Image (spheres, rainbow, N blue to C red):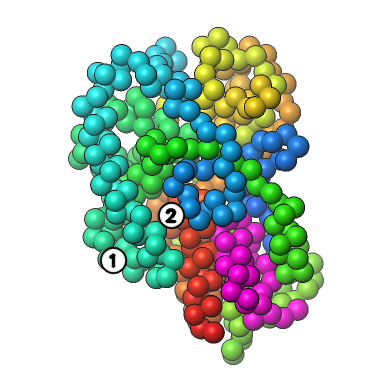
Amino acid sequence: MQKPTLVVGGGISGISAALTLLDSGHEFYLITDNLGGRVRYDPQAKVNYGAYFVMGSYSYACRILTPEALLKPTSVLFHNSPEVSFPLLHPHSLARLPDLTRFFFAMRQFTSHYGPYKERCLIMPQKQALAVDPYLADLFSQPASEFIREKGFEQASADYIASFTFACTGVSPEGLTAFDFLNVSTGLIVPIYCFRFDQDALVRRLGGRLVLDSITRIQSEPGHYCLAGRSGQEYTAQNVILATPACVTQDLLGLPEIRQSCQLYVWHIRAVLKPLYRRYELNLFPPTSEIMLTARQWDGTYLVYSNTAGADLMQVCETFEILCQVAWEKAMYVQGSAYLDQQPAPGLYLAGDHNGLGLEPAAISGIFAANQIIAKG
């Protein structure tokens, strides 16, 4: 099978690349065995078993995902320890006001730089987009824990911010870069929403350009690439966008190093939570906990997230029944300083969350790759 371009991988980055090519009239195949990738939405249960929310600032990911229910800050309970917890509107927040003020000033500075950076990343490689802004370039290599100490909001981080970023990543600030920490923390200052993913509508839109297969080998030939599918089908193209998970990209290309991944485990349960936890829609736990968060769903069921496969759900439940369980052994690539070039060879582009955390950076990386191909004519 032959097309000018092959998009390999059906997560947010691959879908974003494919739709950008589609809108330009460029011929392509999107090859995937998992349309949606880390987005695993069950339309019957109306539940997400992977990525859980989108931010109001996700202008590119929200071209694919539809925001729905607003997650209210007043419906969140932060747990500092098994004995200490408090909502956002609480006298404890007044004691942390100086720290929180310093945090919000740091976030204001970051977001003022990050918006223009996103736009640059649509048309230029990420390294080049960072080089334009030394402030962001420094954050990209600075440990988040060092940034927190430098800006003086350690106590607010321990009580509030780290629980939120832990709920999003399964990793403490010690394991994140300052760039990723601030990017995730944006969800504390902008509206965040549960979302819907209409996979059937996307399949109809892609039509015959969608191929259900997984690629096991990629080989460079003069003027084109040859790819082998697990189905036994072979594919050729002048351009290839590898929008696969970083570990798959590493195996296909023989890359020496990638960021380390986190592990996330999700339980959808019908349960009676313990009294402390049932009062709030969201419970966020500190990085020392094996439970990351509990989230009440529209029908009164719950999602429980953990970074531990054998987490004891009775820590938060009086009784429970498991409706569904999903394991993400390689959920997000969030730790380490390895960087993958977005164009490692002529006609070959990498897209995904290899170098940046979140659905929005993944979407932008796919659009960038497609834009490079479209610009070649």
Callout 2: helix, strand or loop?
Answer: loop
Q: Amino acid at mark 1?
A: Ala
Q: Position of residue 175 (x, y in %)?
A: 38, 42
Decide which of tag 1 and tag 2 comes sooner along the chain: 1
- Tag 2 residue: 356
Res 139 visible: yes
Res 311 visible: no
* Label ID, residue 131: 1
Callout 1: helix, strand or loop?
Answer: helix
The answer for how far apart the CA atoms under marks 1 and 2 are is 15 Å
As drawn, is 306 to the left or to the right of 91? right
Residue at 57%, 34% in the rendered image: 69
Residue at 47%, 73% in the rendered image: 343
Within-10-Å neighbours for mark 1: few <14, some 14–19, many 20+? few
As drawn, is 262 to the left or to the right of 112? right
Q: Position of residue 14 (x, y in %)?
A: 60, 62
Furthest toward the top, the residue is: 275
Is residue 175 one of those drawn in magenta? no
Tell me the quarter of the picture where residue 94 sits.
top left
Magenta residues span 1-30
